[in-house]
Image (cartoon, rainbow, N blue to C red):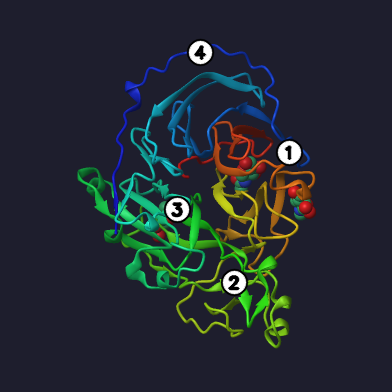
Amino acid sequence: MALLKFVLLVFGALSPSVLAQSCATINPVQTPSFASGYSGRVVINGLRTPRGIIFDNQGNLLITEQGGYGVRYVQLTDNGGTNVCVKSNKQLIAEDTINHGIALSPDGKKLYVSSQLYVWSWDYMAPQGLTLLVPKGRPDLLLVQRGSQDNIDTAAGQIETARSQIRVFKIADVEKSPVEYSTGEVLAWGIRNTVGVGEDSWGGIWSVDNGVDDMTRENKDIHNTNPCEELNFYGYINSNCTSVPTNSQTNHRYLEDPTVLPSPLNTQMKVGDTIAHGTANTASTCANCVSPKLCFPAHMAPLDIKFNANSTAAHIAFHGSWNRQPPDGFRVSRVEWDQATGMPVESVTSTTAVKNITFNANNADCPNGCFWPVGLTWDHKGRLFMASDSTNEVWIISGAEQTEGTNETM
Ligand SMILES: *[C@@H]1O[C@H](CO)[C@@H](O)[C@H](O)[C@H]1NC(C)=O
Ligand SMILES: *[C@@H]1O[C@H](CO)[C@@H](O)[C@H](O)[C@H]1NC(C)=O
Ligand SMILES: *[C@@H]1O[C@H](CO)[C@@H](O)[C@H](O)[C@H]1NC(C)=O
């Protein structure tokens, strides 16, 4: 049982204190590599475990800090390119339970932050907090993601647990009074820990899901390259949407590397195929399961997905692995999209769909010597901003897109 409380905040009322700062170079804790045509620099450092970032419609940056510091409000001075620096910086909401999600209503007048989460037991709280999204075509709705209770949360395969799900709430209802999470309409269930939820140009709802750790089959350890992290699609919630589609994945595991399975499935299955929940070496027979659209390498921990303005690509923040040797992730990647189909260009069996944009020169240095990307957001000039919670920085990344990007979600 979980209750949600919502913060209402009107931006006209803000008057941040101005601390003059020059656009001096801020030395990064770790210097990333950039794909050809891309560059970046640190905009702000010294943050306290930054997670979600968004822009308000005045171009101010809002950052949730997980270290018990609520929401930070940052005014920027833009000298063009990556020459962007902090004009003023203040704590906007002091609330030590805020830990990740942040979203603005499309009119920019209401701010939603997550982990205003009341639970009957602390065990019920998702480790990543809640992820929030207000669909552009349905600004009356709020999508709220909730994660699993444990690494393997068998009970979450039952819809009634209201864990490992995305539910949809009417904003008018949640503003009236706290609403129990289990009363929301189910958009998706059986999806383990889906931290990043994003919306494409057509109102299609997508998420990136974090798979289980320490996976075995018939006592064989197959965890290093399984299961894949998933890109999932849930249908459209736009102005044409009359009812919320319901999607199920019921705790199934999709494969990054079928070849390490015990025989005979090692030769029978391909990337993106699913095997059943549990440890038996049997193919899945789930009739209602919705397969991912892409399969990313295991344990890379995708935490955010943001589409560019015309949805020709999505950018994904991979926080990085602890359950994989050598480590992988710790980068911002780009996935090409097909505008005709509204789907990724490559298919679920592809192992080449993800292109490095901002990455570590040598992942063997990770996790300790690496930045860990979390929240992504676009500014109105199509520059990408990235929060890194290992180095307590926000970066600006130029070259990502020349046009405006979308920035509603975290
Ligand atoms: C809504 O439906 C109409 C008619 O089918 C279509 O032309 C339009 O593109 C749809 N709008 C969205 C936002 O999907
Ligand atoms: C992406 O960068 C990582 C290092 O962070 C490297 O190991 C990997 O090979 C790169 N992938 C591609 C497709 O270039
Ligand atoms: C989409 O935007 C990119 C830049 O962000 C641009 O290069 C491309 O031409 C656009 N594509 C379409 C089909 O509008």
User: What is the C-alpha distance between the residues marked 2 and 3?
Assistant: 26 Å
User: What is the C-alpha distance between the residues marked 4 and 3?
Assistant: 39 Å
Asked if the residue at label 3 sits under 8 Å from ligand 1, the reply is yes
User: What is the C-alpha distance between the residues marked 3 and 1?
Assistant: 33 Å
* 359 over 184 or under it: above or below: above
Dot 3 alpha-carbon crowd within 10 angstroms: few under 14, some 14 to 19, many 20 or more: some
Q: Quadrant of residue 108?
A: top left
Residue at 50% x, 68% y is 152
What's the residue type where badge 1 is placed? Pro
Any mark on residue 19, and which?
Answer: 4
Left or right of 85, for residue 362:
right
* Residue 255 horizontal/vertical position (percent): 64, 72
The answer to which of marks 2 and 3 sits earlier in the sequence is: 3
Asked if the residue at label 1 sits under 8 Å from ligand 2, the reply is no
Q: Which residue is mark 1?
A: 32
Q: Which residue is mark 3?
A: 203
Dot 4 alpha-carbon crowd within 10 angstroms: few under 14, some 14 to 19, many 20 or more: few
What's the residue type where badge 3 is placed? Gly
* Residue 301 horizontal/vertical position (percent): 60, 55
Any mark on residue 254, and which?
Answer: 2
Callout 3: helix, strand or loop? Answer: loop
Q: Nearer the viewer, mark 4 or mark 3?
A: 4
Left or right of 309, for residue 261:
right
Residue at 33% x, 56% y is 121
* Residue 77 horizontal/vertical position (percent): 56, 18
Which quadrant contains ligand 1? Answer: bottom left
The answer to which of marks 4 and 2 sits earlier in the sequence is: 4
The answer to which of marks 4 and 1 sits earlier in the sequence is: 4
Q: Residue furthest left?
A: 176
Which residue is more in the foreground, 183 or 369? 369
Callout 1: helix, strand or loop? Answer: loop
